[in-house]
Image: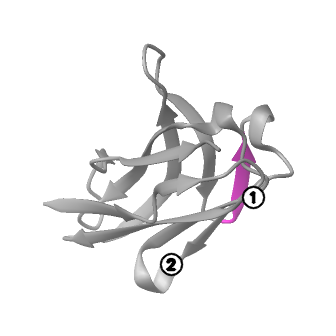
Amino acid sequence: QVQLVESGGGLVQPGGSLRLSCAASGTIFDINTMAWYRQAPGKQRDLVAAVTYGNTNYADSVKGRFTISRDNAKNMVNLQMNSLKPEDTAVYYCYAVIRTRIGGPTYQWWGQGTQVTVSS
């Protein structure tokens, strides 16, 4: 089994910064993709940023403000969020695509979510 545990959410004023972290633990052979999604009330869950090995991609709405980074040795992914806006308010979910054994299939895993609120 695999667990994804997020940390770093909270309340911040517009223009402020937050850093989210997610650590994967359990039986892990290889992590293909690590990403952050977010879901605002009444809306669908959308991709914020992803890193697949060395390649990153971002939602247009966060480009230039958010930076995703990955620590392969620690099976962690971080999301540095700068210049936060009220529309960034959402529950942020960590996501990973993980292979648990050599030659085995990959599985998708989700964290429990962490609330980010941007408000004055």
Camera-side residue of 80 and 28? 80
> Quadrant location of the N terminus?
bottom left
- The answer to whether any part of residue 28 appears in the image is no
Quarter of image, res 25 = bottom left
Residue under label 2: 72
Between disc 2 and disc 1, the foreground one is 1
Q: Which residues are magenta?
A: 54-58
Residue under label 1: 82
Left or right: where 95 falls relative to 106? right
Residue count near mark 1 (Cα–Cα under 10 Å), binned few <14, some 14–19, many ≥20? some
Asked which secondary structure carries label 2, the reply is helix
**Residue at image location 82% in from the left, 45% down from the top:** 63
List the single residue furthest toward the bottom: 73
**Residue at image location 75% in from the left, 58% down from the top:** 82
Q: Earlier in the sequence, mark 2 or mark 1?
A: 2
- The answer to whether any part of residue 58 appears in the image is yes
